[in-house]
Image: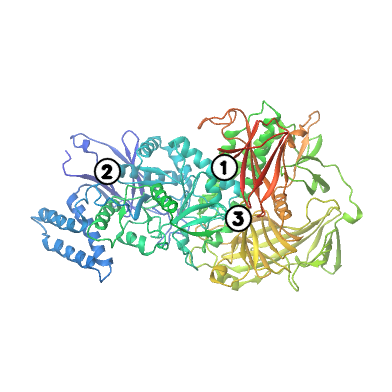
């Protein structure tokens, strides 16, 4: 028979574990190494009968399986664990209570200022407790006496959940949290287990500590819990209903914000918010992203459009050059939308809830002139299982201390409020006159700059699949309009998107996870590619088209899925090229003979020096380097005097610690030019001319680059550029490969494409804030322009860039050895292009970068098939060329599309997402030949905001600079 006051099972094998009931329900997580070794035995088990429970053990610690003390080293597959504690313990609760009493008063005695009476009093209270303590016989009574003395300092209610001595609002809002990286030093499969362990702990603590509020983000983790552990999911649902378990964030995962496309960021919220709404009846109000590596300038706009006006983060406290100056502030996007942003002044999202954390919530608060409140986000993350009993006990005492004996020296700290309570109070204060400081544009993170480049293959897959989704949704939408029998493949599209969104997790897409995680993403991307290809083929078939293969007969046509006309040289068969003048939709690929003046030409000017030319450019190439790029129309040399365009360079890349994450400014000092062999002609025109060059990087690594110039026709819709295709065999250690373009352009700012817009960054190191941006994130292009001329560098899969003075540098490959020992080793295919342009940066570059990433699709019209030509031109945008129709899809809630999770909307609708790409208010017209009844402007969650004037197939639209606008055409 079990006896005792309070019985616990203590288990520690230095690893993670999970207690299961005899009937197969997960009850509570355990974390070894003393982190969380105990489980309370049910009172009902004192009935003298036999009871069984199970402990599941994982072969990993809190932070994976790294050998030794360095947790970011690649995991050791031969790690061994030993069970060193397995006890049933009768706990003396008074002793446990006194331990925490003494801990907190001791902290007060150590950490309050030396000249404060509160510190001296705390010291005296500690002395009194020690003086009454008796070891051995009579100890229990002395412990109770000690607790009584402690109450003099901590208040009478240290053991009580809800009694607050103070009726006033808290200054520090303590919020329980468990930051679980969706993958990192462990794969997704382990994260699924970390979730059930952590969240069952929290449900248990909520039973015992009614004031405990626990907030958790990432719809994906909730979905995994629902799939794998429905028992715990129901438990969580119950706690959500009771207001203790608080879903937050509104996004699918806590994603990277630098690299996902605009549409991906939208989908993070669309899929996230729809999950939260359908399972918990409410959308989130706060975007929660404590741990990602920089924050894109368009986040405030997209966050607003996803129904959230608040943003919590923390990571900028890791900046290694400048201190970010604000704690609570307005953050404004490119288009002027703003959110209320708060960064926890305790500078952590995994606080231990110590005395010092509460104290730092004021001493490190940078916005005290405006508002003194803050969030304290506490709880062990990543397998530590969230807040612990000790943390909650400490906070009860700190609450007591702040309400009584500290007399205001310790800020008033409370549990029991939600993050939304904190922000709502702030919003009230702002409404009644509190004037917060404003930060415009990106929150650039001055660390982890290598994450724009590491794990190149993964990043390339992300880019390619974003473009694949654009085409699938566009074609499938047209197919539903063309063929009533065709069913919009919503379930499959959701699956594809959820996979892409998952891979954008903040340790996944940035490249900071272990090798196992990238084995997982490779598999997922391959699955997506296969399924996506099938969906695209099905949609094409419904449109009377099939994909061109070597054997297929019939007429070959090109599909332009982009919303503007373009001219492209297309390879139609083996070694056969033609020019395609492509309108949006279908275009002929019939052979078009070029005029003599339009042809691309190549000559060997002198030994090993080649001259490539078309009607626009004359390009001199020697040993793979562009020594001259002359713009015949502008009569202007593009390459800086004496400069070498397309020069490959390599750097030593040895960061201080975080290998996969960081590239430090000192790597620039180790620049070495790679010397290439003699270039050789591979394409002689007239449609395309090319030279190929081999470059030895080291004994193990080499590169083959092909520089090409296409014919440039007189009536071209597309600007001409010099393109480069590289094959790299890469087997280096801590090296960084880049390609350089020294251009003859002067500007103190360069421009980079970001989601739905442009971001300008300095080209100089005037101040520490400028030099901190020595490596930055770009999307499909970077640009350095003067007032009337400039150069854009396009890419098909890269995100790292730097412009210093007139030197533009595209980052290609890194070679970190931790946490993935084999990151980026192997073969890579990379494309980029140098596009000089007359005039300042304009929509031509935006269009060219889209075209470069989304080549024309060749398909066959099978004999006898009559494709519905008109359907391809049934939706169009006219007006300002800076307006980009970026997404065409079916409405989420359409009755023939909706998956039944949320309310269905009658009838069918088409969603159009349009953004203003240049930064100027722009007007345009949505034109449609479809039977459209009404046109609405919506948010990104597809809630109607306003009805537009619509008639005769036209609706006028006007967009703010860099606005993202969503329209719903009700059929
Ligand atoms: Zn994280």
Please give the label number shown on residue 673.
none
Q: In the picture, residue 746 is in which quadrant?
A: bottom right
Number of the front mark, 2 or 1: 1
Sequence order check, earlier mark of 2 and 1: 2
Q: Secondary structure at mark 3?
A: helix
Q: Is residue 34 visible?
A: no
Q: Which residue is mark 2?
A: 208
User: Which percent across, then down, holds residue 830?
Assistant: 68, 56
In the image, the residue with mark 3 has its CB under 8 Å from the nearest atom of ligand 1: no
Please give the label number shown on residue 456.
3
Q: Secondary structure at mark 2?
A: helix
User: Which percent across, then down, holds residue 840?
Assistant: 72, 61
Q: Secondary structure at mark 1?
A: loop
Looking at this view, is 341 or 104 the one in front?
341
Q: In the picture, residue 836 is in which quadrant?
A: bottom right
Sequence order check, earlier mark of 1 and 3: 3
User: Which percent across, then down, holds residue 457?
Assistant: 61, 53
Question: Farthest residue in the left direction?
Answer: 137
Q: What's the residue at 44%, 41% (across, down)?
A: 222
Residue 944 vs 895, above or below: the answer is below
Number of the front mark, 2 or 3: 2
Looking at this view, is 22 or 234 the one in front?
234
Q: Which residue is mark 1?
A: 940
**Is 640 positioned to the left or the right of 225 in the image?**
right
Q: CA distance from mark 1 to mark 3?
A: 30 Å
Sequence order check, earlier mark of 2 and 3: 2
Q: CA distance from mark 2 to mark 3?
A: 48 Å
Q: What's the residue at 31%, 43% (across, down)?
A: 206
């Amino acid at each position: 028979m079990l006896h005792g006051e309070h019985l616990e099972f203590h288990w520690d094998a230095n690893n993670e574990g999970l207690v299961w009931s005899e009937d197969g329900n997960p009850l509570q997580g355990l974390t070894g190494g003393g982190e969380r070794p105990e489980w309370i035995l049910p009172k009902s088990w004192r009935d003298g009968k036999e009871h069984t429970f199970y402990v599941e053990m994982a072969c990993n610690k809190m932070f994976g399986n790294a050998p030794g003390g360095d947790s970011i080293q690649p995991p050791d597959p031969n790690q061994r664990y030993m069970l060193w504690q397995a006890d049933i313990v009768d706990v003396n609760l008074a002793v446990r209570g006194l331990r925490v009493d003494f801990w907190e008063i001791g902290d007060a005695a150590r950490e309050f200022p030396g000249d404060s009476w509160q510190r001296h009093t705390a010291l005296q209270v500690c002395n009194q407790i020690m003086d009454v303590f008796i070891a051995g016989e009579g100890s229990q009574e002395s412990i109770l006496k000690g607790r009584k003395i402690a109450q003099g300092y901590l208040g009478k209610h240290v053991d009580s959940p809800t009694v607050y001595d103070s009726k006033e609002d808290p200054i520090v809002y303590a919020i329980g949290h468990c930051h679980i990286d969706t993958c990192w030093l462990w794969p997704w499969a382990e994260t699924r287990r970390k979730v059930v362990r952590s969240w069952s702990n929290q449900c248990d603590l909520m039973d015992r500590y009614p004031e405990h509020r626990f907030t958790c983000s990432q719809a994906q983790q909730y979905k995994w819990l629902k799939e794998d552990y429905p028992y715990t999911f129901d438990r969580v649902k119950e706690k959500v209903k009771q207001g203790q378990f608080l879903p937050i964030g509104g996004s699918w995962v806590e994603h990277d914000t630098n690299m996902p496309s605009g549409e991906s960021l939208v989908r993070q919220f669309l899929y996230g918010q729809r999950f939260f709404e359908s399972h918990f009846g409410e959308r989130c109000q706060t975007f929660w992203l404590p741990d990602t590596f920089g924050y894109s300038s368009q986040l405030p706009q997209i966050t607003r459009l996803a129904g959230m006006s608040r943003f919590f983060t923390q990571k900028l406290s890791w900046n290694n050059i400048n201190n970010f100056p604000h704690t609570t502030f307005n953050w404004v996007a490119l288009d002027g939308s703003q959110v209320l942003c708060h960064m926890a002044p305790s500078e952590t999202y995994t606080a231990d809830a110590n005395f010092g954390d509460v104290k730092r919530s004021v001493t490190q608060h940078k916005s005290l002139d405006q508002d003194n409140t803050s969030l304290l986000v506490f709880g062990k993350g990543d397998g530590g299982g969230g807040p612990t009993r000790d943390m909650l006990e400490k906070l009860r005492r700190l609450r007591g201390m702040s309400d009584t004996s500290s007399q205001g020296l310790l800020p008033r700290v409370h549990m029991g409020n939600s993050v939304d309570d904190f922000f709502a109070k702030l919003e009230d204060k702002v409404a009644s006159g509190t004037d917060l400081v404003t930060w415009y544009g990106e929150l650039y993170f001055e660390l982890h700059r290598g994450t724009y480049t590491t794990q190149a293959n993964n990043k390339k897959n992300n880019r390619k699949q974003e473009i694949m989704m654009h085409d699938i949704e566009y074609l499938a939408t047209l197919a539903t309009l063309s063929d009533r029998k065709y069913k919009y493949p919503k379930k499959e599209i959701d699956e594809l998107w959820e996979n892409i969104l998952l891979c954008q997790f903040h340790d996944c897409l940035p490249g900071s996870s272990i090798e196992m995680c990238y084995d997982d993403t490779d598999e997922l991307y391959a699955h997506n590619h296969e399924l996506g290809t099938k969906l695209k083929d099905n949609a094409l078939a419904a449109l009377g088209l099939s994909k061109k293969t070597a054997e297929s007969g019939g007429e070959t046509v090109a599909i332009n899925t982009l919303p503007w006309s373009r001219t492209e040289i297309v390879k139609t068969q083996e070694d056969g090229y033609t020019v395609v003048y492509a309108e949006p939709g279908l275009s002929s690929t019939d052979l078009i003979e070029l005029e003599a003046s339009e042809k691309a030409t190549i000559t060997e000017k002198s030994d090993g020096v080649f001259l490539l030319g078309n009607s626009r450019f004359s390009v001199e190439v020697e040993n793979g380097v562009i020594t001259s790029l002359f713009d015949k129309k502008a009569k202007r040399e593009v390459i800086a005097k004496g400069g070498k365009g397309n020069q490959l360079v390599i750097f030593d890349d040895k960061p201080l610690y975080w290998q996969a994450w960081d590239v430090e400014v000192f790597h620039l000092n180790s620049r070495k030019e790679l010397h290439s062999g003699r270039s050789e002609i591979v394409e002689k025109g007239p449609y395309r001319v090319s030279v190929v060059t081999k470059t030895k990087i080291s004994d193990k690594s080499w590169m083959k680059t092909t520089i090409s110039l296409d014919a440039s026709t007189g009536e071209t819709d597309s600007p001409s550029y010099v393109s480069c295709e590289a094959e790299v065999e890469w087997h280096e250690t801590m090296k960084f490969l880049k390609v350089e373009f020294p251009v003859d352009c002067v500007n103190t700012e360069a421009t980079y494409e970001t989601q739905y817009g442009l971001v300008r960054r300095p080209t100089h190191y005037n101040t520490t804030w400028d030099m901190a941006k020595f490596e930055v994130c770009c999307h499909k292009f970077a640009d350095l322009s003067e007032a009337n001329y400039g150069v854009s560098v396009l890419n098909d899969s890269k995100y790292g860039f730097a412009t210093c003075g007139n030197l533009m540098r595209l980052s290609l490959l890194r070679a970190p050895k931790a946490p993935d020992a084999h990151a980026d080793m192997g073969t890579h295919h990379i494309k980029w292009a140098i596009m000089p342009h007359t005039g300042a940066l304009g929509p031509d570059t935006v269009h060219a970068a889209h075209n470069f990433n989304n080549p024309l699709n060749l398909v066959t019209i099978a004999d006898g098939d009559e494709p519905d030509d008109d359907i391809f031109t049934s939706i169009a945008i006219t007006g300002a060329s800076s307006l980009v129709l970026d997404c065409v899809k079916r409405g989420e809630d359409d009755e023939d599309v909706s998956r039944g999770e949320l309310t269905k909307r009658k009838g069918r609708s088409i969603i159009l997402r349009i953004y203003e790409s240049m930064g100027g208010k722009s007007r345009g017209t949505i034109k449609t030949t479809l039977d459209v009844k009404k046109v609405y402007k919506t948010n990104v969650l597809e809630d109607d905001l306003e009805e537009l004037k619509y008639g005769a197939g036209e609706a006028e639209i006007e967009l703010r600079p860099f606005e993202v606008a969503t329209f719903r055409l009700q059929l």
